[in-house]
Image (cartoon, rainbow, N blue to C red):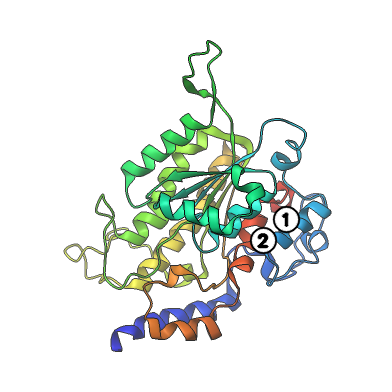
């Protein structure tokens, strides 16, 4: 039982930090934020709140004409917008994928387990939109898998050469409009390593998504969106650059399941901010944002003690899965002017 105390402590910290989070989560309040055009976000989405679902978000943005240009500009064109979603076969990834497909977007669902992802599409996605979803094998804890997945996405979703050779080349690639970095690992009790020897949470949640983003960024729409799912857990994370991987022989920094998770989420936010700054400095209109989706009872908690799950579901979890996906969908689909 004593081994479970660190988990419950971490859970309690997350629950408390929700109240003071500074992560981007537009759907948890009606703060009077103002864009450069003078339009208040709260006026545009006044009917959305913490309990709004992903479908509520899509309907509201469509009703208020606040959908991103890559959605509206392609309604009357043959070319579909493209979204790449990591962790799309579980948790908030499933309703995120479904809602993006409902918006008319071609979704590349990235998952470690292709069989499980196929079952999810068959069992949980409406028949009418299944054809819009394409499964891509991706293990973010293995750089070779990340490289392979990025290469296959570029190759499979490009136009053919004019000579009819059926060879697809990067320069003719249909642009990716959305990259949703949604996958994650949370609080394994023992230090575990990625294929390349990095601490699993930092290596997967941050380094894996960092590498995946850098490989796909050259193939993104000039007005596209990079959305990274962070967490209020960043508030108890620290980046110790002398020992990011919690290696015992380097410093006296011992492995902490929640400390390592917080570090990875802090890295997610800093990555999104750094990428946003660099894109702006280079004159790109691509937006990079991070978000806190809320505390949701999903399989992300699989490393927590089974006896603690009723406590998590009844007291700590503040959203269901459909509500948890709402900020994902909002960040992916809202018009870019809302971020100014």
Residue at (49, 45) in percent of width and height: 135
Q: Would residue 214 appear left or right of 192 to someone viewing this image? A: right
Which residue is at the front of the view, 177 or 308?
A: 308
Contact? badges 2 and 1 (CB < 8 Å): yes
Label 2, secondary structure: give it.
Answer: helix
Q: Would residue 310 appear left or right of 201 to someone viewing this image? A: right
| Residue 36 circle label | none
Q: Which residue is mark 1?
A: 58
Query: Is 273 placed above or below 246 here?
Result: above
Report crowding for label 2: few under 14, some 14 to 19, many 20 or more residues within 10 A (C-alpha).
many
Q: Which residue is mark 2?
A: 54
Q: Position of residue 273 (x, y in %)?
A: 54, 52
Residue at (41, 44) in percent of width and height: 211
Residue furthest out toward the top: 163
Report crowding for label 1: few under 14, some 14 to 19, many 20 or more residues within 10 A (C-alpha).
many
Which residue is at the front of the view, 259 or 115?
A: 115
Label 1, secondary structure: give it.
Answer: helix
Q: Position of residue 226 (x, y in %)?
A: 56, 47
Q: Position of residue 26 (x, y in %)?
A: 68, 64
- Separation of disc 2 and disc 1 at Cα? 6 Å
């Amino acid at each position: 039982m004593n081994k479970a105390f660190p988990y419950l402590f971490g859970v309690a910290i997350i629950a408390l930090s929700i109240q003071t989070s500074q992560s981007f989560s537009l759907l948890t309040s009606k703060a009077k934020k103002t864009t450069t055009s003078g339009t208040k976000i709260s006026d545009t989405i006044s009917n959305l709140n913490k309990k709004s679902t992903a479908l509520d978000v899509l309907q509201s943005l469509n009703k208020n004409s606040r959908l991103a240009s890559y959605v509206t500009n392609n309604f009357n064109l043959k070319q579909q917008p493209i979204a790449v979603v990591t962790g799309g076969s579980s948790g908030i990834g499933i309703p995120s994928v479904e809602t993006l497909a409902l918006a008319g977007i071609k979704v590349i669902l990235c998952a470690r387990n292709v069989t499980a992802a196929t079952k999810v599409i068959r069992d949980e996605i409406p028949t009418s939109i299944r054809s819009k979803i394409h499964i891509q094998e991706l293990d973010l804890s293995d750089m070779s898998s990340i490289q392979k997945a990025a290469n296959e996405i570029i190759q499979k979703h490009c136009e053919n050469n004019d000579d009819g050779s059926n060879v697809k080349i990067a320069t003719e690639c249909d642009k990716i409009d959305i990259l949703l970095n949604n996958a994650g690992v949370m609080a394994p009790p023992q230090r575990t390593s990625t294929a390349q020897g990095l601490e699993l949470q930092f290596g997967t949640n941050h380094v894996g998504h960092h590498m995946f983003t850098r490989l796909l960024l050259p193939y993104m729409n000039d007005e596209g969106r990079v959305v990274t799912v962070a967490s209020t857990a960043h508030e108890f994370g620290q980046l110790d650059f002398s020992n990011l991987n919690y290696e015992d022989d380097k410093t006296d920094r011992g492995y902490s399941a929640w400390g390592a998770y917080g570090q990875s989420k802090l890295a997610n936010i800093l990555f999104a901010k750094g990428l946003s700054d660099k894109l702006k400095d280079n004159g790109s209109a691509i937006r990079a944002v991070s978000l806190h989706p809320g505390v949701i009872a999903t399989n992300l908690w699989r490393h927590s003690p089974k006896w603690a799950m009723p406590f998590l579901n009844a007291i700590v979890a503040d959203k269901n899965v459909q509500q948890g996906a709402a900020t994902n969908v909002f960040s992916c689909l809202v018009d870019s002017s809302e971020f100014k």
